[in-house]
């Protein structure tokens, strides 16, 4: 079961056909942007074929239950830094939804994901951080918003802050 903030961003991301690509800049270079259907993390990637290892990792993450043992937390934190953006998103979402509250390692991993090169990963980090830390995430999000260049992520931060403000 997804927490409300994670459901909301998943709902807010338009279907692949309607999504507008958002190019990003890094040291004066344009980064090639790509579209992703976030509802199907096992579909073929940009190379055209998903490796068996990536499929296995995604399957393991998607199969995790409500209670996540410590070894699985470490697995998710490690995979939040994967080279594959879909694995990073799946790991971040699972940490935000299912990790036991109060773990500094989870908090740090989610905050680190706000610095990811991919704006979709950063957007999911916003909602996962909000789900995990709840009201405690507001100051972190407000601070990150100042330096965020992606309009998509800024909009996700604004929605998260609005939802948190309405709860409190």
Image (cartoon, rainbow, N blue to C red):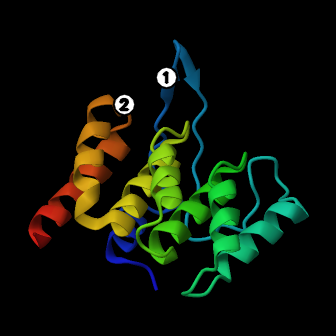
Say which residue label 2 marks. 149
With 73 as the anchor, is 13 left or right in this view?
left
Please tell me which residue is depicted at 70% across the width and 64% down the height of the picture: 75
To which quarter of the image does residue 40 belong?
Answer: bottom right
Callout 2: SS: loop
Q: Position of residue 56 (x, y in %)?
A: 82, 70
Residue that appears at 54% across and 87% down: 66
Judge from the rendering whether residue 23 lies leftward or rightward of residue 91; answer left or right. left
* Neighbourhood count class around disc 1 (C-alpha, 10 Å): few under 14, some 14–19, many 20 upward: few
Question: Residue 4 — which label?
Answer: none
| Front residue of 12 and 117 | 117
Q: Is residue 55 visible?
A: yes
Marks 2 and 1 close (CB-CB < 8 Å): yes
x, y percentage for residue 162? 16, 59
Q: Residue at x 60, y 80 (%)?
A: 68
Q: How many circles with numbers are drawn on the protein?
A: 2
Q: Mark 1 = which residue?
A: 25
Where's residue 54, x and y in %? Answer: 80, 61
Residue 82, x across and y down, in percent: 70, 50
Q: Quadrant of residue 7?
A: bottom left
Q: Quadrant of residue 118?
A: top right
């Amino acid at each position: 079961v997804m927490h409300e903030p994670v459901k909301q961003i998943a709902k807010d991301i338009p279907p692949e056909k309607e999504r507008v690509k958002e190019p990003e800049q890094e040291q004066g270079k344009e980064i090639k942007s790509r579209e992703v259907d976030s509802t199907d993390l096992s579909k073929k990637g940009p190379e055209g074929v998903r490796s068996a290892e990536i499929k296995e990792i995604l399957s393991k993450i998607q199969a995790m239950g409500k209670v996540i043992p410590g070894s699985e937390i470490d697995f998710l934190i490690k995979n939040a830094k994967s080279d594959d953006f879909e694995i990073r998103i799946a790991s971040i979402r699972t940490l935000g939804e299912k990790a036991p509250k109060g773990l500094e390692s989870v908090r740090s991993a989610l905050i680190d994901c706000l610095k990811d090169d991919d704006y979709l990963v950063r957007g999911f980090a916003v909602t996962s951080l909000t789900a995990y830390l709840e009201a405690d995430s507001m100051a972190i999000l407000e601070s990150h918003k100042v330096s965020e260049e992606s309009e998509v992520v800024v909009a996700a931060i604004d929605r998260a802050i609005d939802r948190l403000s309405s709860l409190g």
